Amino acid sequence: MSTRFLFDFSVNKANNTIQVKREFAADLDLVWEAWTNPELLDLWWAPKPYRTQTKSMDFSEGGYWHYCMISPENEVHWCRADYQKVEPKKSFSGLDAFCDENGAVVQDFPRSLWNNVFAEKANKTTLVEITISYDSLSDLEKVVEMGFKEGFSMALENLDQYLETRL
């Protein structure tokens, strides 16, 4: 299904950003819920064969999502997203980071600022435009080298599969 809809992934080294434009075959309400409901995020966020498990989530300005990605060998990688701005069914932004089990940010890995914008299209699809900003070129390059494009692409395909079950 993802081959029929827009998917654009670009890296801009001049301004330390990754830009992702991704269209989903579902209406805005369903796509927004999938990005903001922890039970649904757990179904698709991690690239297979990893899985996501939410520890806590307060989806509001000043709140955060504390979760882990678990490998098939049960290796646990903790993460948190600190929400800065939320405009329901339009956009949200926040700082993303690796952290420990208690939510303390790990300083060895780059933090990124995510800006996610949602727009419903006339054909009952939803376009999500994501801009991920890094403090430095070396931070951006480190994330790209870690396989971010491949992993995030897999997660978005998981979301496609979830949305298909809801239609």
Image: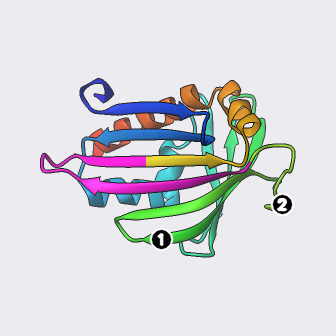
Q: Are marks 2 and 1 in contact (CB under 8 Å)?
A: no
**Residue drawn 71% across and 37% down?**
137
For marks 2 and 1, the one nearer the N-term is: 1
Image quarter in which the N terminus is found: top left
- Check if residue 132 falls in the magenta segment: no
Residue at the spot of label 1 = 86
Measured as percent of width and height from the top left, residue 114 is found at 56, 53
Q: Is residue 122 left or right of residue 8?
A: left
Q: Is residue 103 above or below residue 145?
A: below
Q: Is residue 70 left or right of residue 48?
A: right
Q: Is residue 24 above or below residue 62?
A: above
Packing grade of label 2 (10 A; few <14, some 14-19, many >=20) is few
Measured as percent of width and height from the top left, residue 126 is found at 27, 49
Q: Is residue 106 left or right of residue 56?
A: right
Q: Secondary structure at mark 2?
A: loop
Q: Is residue 132 left or right of residue 99?
A: left
**Residue drawn 49% across and 29% down?**
154
Q: Amino acid at mark 2?
A: Ala
**Residue drawn 52% across and 70% down?**
85
Measured as percent of width and height from the top left, residue 58 is found at 59, 71
- Check if residue 118 falls in the magenta segment: yes
Closest to the observer: 79 or 123? Answer: 123
Residue at the spot of label 2 = 104
From which residue to which does the magenta span run?
111-129
